[in-house]
Each structure stands twice: as structure tokens, then as C-alpha cells.
Image (cartoon, helix red, strand yellow):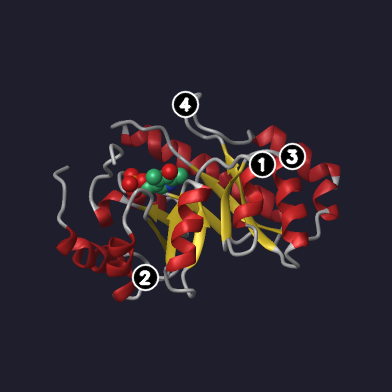
Amino acid sequence: MTPKMNVTIKENLLAIREALPENVALVAVSKTKSEAEILEAYAVGQRIFGENKVQEMSKKQETLPQDIEWHMIGHVQRNKVKYMAPYVALIHGVDSLKLLQEIDKQAKKNDRTIPCLFQIHIAQESSKFGFNEEELEEMVQSGILEQLKNVEIKGLMGMATFTDNRDQVRTEFRLLKAIFDKLRVKLPQLQVLSMGMSGDYPIAIEEGSNMVRIGSSIFGERNYSQ
Ligand SMILES: *Cc1c(COP(=O)(O)O)cnc(C)c1O
């Protein structure tokens, strides 16, 4: 992919949004992107933005318009939860009970409920975080979730393997959708299935995603050297 200039953020966003089915929410992944770039997306109505670093997100949250919904999509360290607890709209990457307990504690301190997704490990790469199906079931069965009054489990999130093999990506998304459907029998409040990024979101949507997290196809390639 060639780097895109800022002038195309608006066009990229409008084209993607037009192609998304109505039931699919779009998280514009703005990690490493400037406030000016985020404001370009904001100007055409985008209100949900995703970041993967708590510190970067909090800095942006302080200065950017207050009606933005900030989603934490990255791996979260427990000692960072307190910094986003006052405002975060959805935490996608909940991958341990200890993290969920810390989110509950910090939410309570802020007198609010924090919406969360459980991250499920579906990729073949070992580097991707998340529960496996067995761990998830155990946690649900244990009844421990009912004790956490200040978190709201809204659904599941997953990332497919980074590969050109479309069939493999499809199989992984299909697995996540199957886990989602099965879990909903016990937890009917589960509504959100967050899967799909720039490279694979059309497949994710075909497999039942209702929330996609798209960065580079909106904002252009990320430059981590800055
Ligand atoms: C960076 C990131 C994305 C967006 O990736 P793109 O390929 O730029 O669309 C989506 N989800 C997660 C968890 C990410 O870290």
C-alpha cells in the first residue's frame, strides 16, 4: 500500500462507511495519528476512535472534542487502567480475569460501569493475546463475573492471523463467531463482535462481525519512527 496524504482521510472514511452494512460499527483506529488527522475524520461525522496505548489515548481525550467515544483496542497493563477509567467507552482487549477485576475496581472508583469485550485467541501466532474457549467457559461457569458490578461484558473481540491465506482468516473469524453464538446462550447481554481490520474486514463482516477496527485504510500507513 502506498502512503496516503491527509487530504484523503475524508474520502477514505466516507468510502468505507458507505460500503459497511448498517449494523456494523466503525472504530477509526487513530493510534500514532495526530490530533489534526483525527479532527479531519471527526469533521465528517466519525465519533468512535480506537487507540492501543493508554497514555496516548488520554492525551488525545483531554484536548479533542468531548463527544468522541474512545475505545481501547490494545493490550492493557493493569497499572494503566486507572488513567482511562474516567472516560473510556469500550475496552476491547480484556484477556485475563485479573485485568477485568482491576477495570471493575477503577470503574467503581469513578462511579461508573465500563463496557468490556473479552479478547479471544483465534490466530495461529502465539504473540496474540486472549482467552481460549475453554478458559472463557470456565470463567463464565465459575459465577465470578456476577460479582463484578462495575463492568459490563458487551461481547468478544479477536484478531485473525496476519496472512495472505484468506481461507485461514475466514476459518478463524468463523470460529470466533461460533464461540460468540455459543456464549450468548448463557450471556444474552453479549451484543458486540469486534473483528476485522484494514486487511480483512470484508471477510470478517461476511462471517458475522458487527464492529470493525480500521486504521491504515482510513489514515494511511502508520509511521512509528516519530
Ligand atoms: C492497529 C490495530 C487495528 C487497525 O489496524 P489496520 O490494519 O491499520 O486497520 C485494529 N485492531 C487492533 C487491535 C490494532 O492494534
Label placed on residue 124? 4
* Mark with earlier residue (1, 4): 1
Q: For the residues marked 1 and 3, what is the alpha-carbon distance in whole angstroms?
A: 8 Å
Q: Earlier in the sequence, mark 2 or mark 1?
A: 2
Q: Which mark is residue 78?
A: 1
Foreground: disc 4 or disc 2: 2
Pointer 4 or 2: first along the chain: 2
Between 6 and 207, the one lying in front of the other is: 6
The residues tagged by marks 4 and 2 sit, at their Cα atoms, a distance apart of: 33 Å
**Residue at the disc numbered 3:** 98
Q: What residue type is labelled 1?
A: Arg
Residue, disc 2: 46
Residue shown at 64%/49% (left/top)?
Answer: 81
The reply to whether the C-beta atoms of the residues labelled 2 and 3 are less than 8 Å apart is no
Residue 95 at x, y = what percent?
63, 39
Q: Residue at x 42, y 55 (%)?
A: 212
Which amino acid, mark 4? Gln
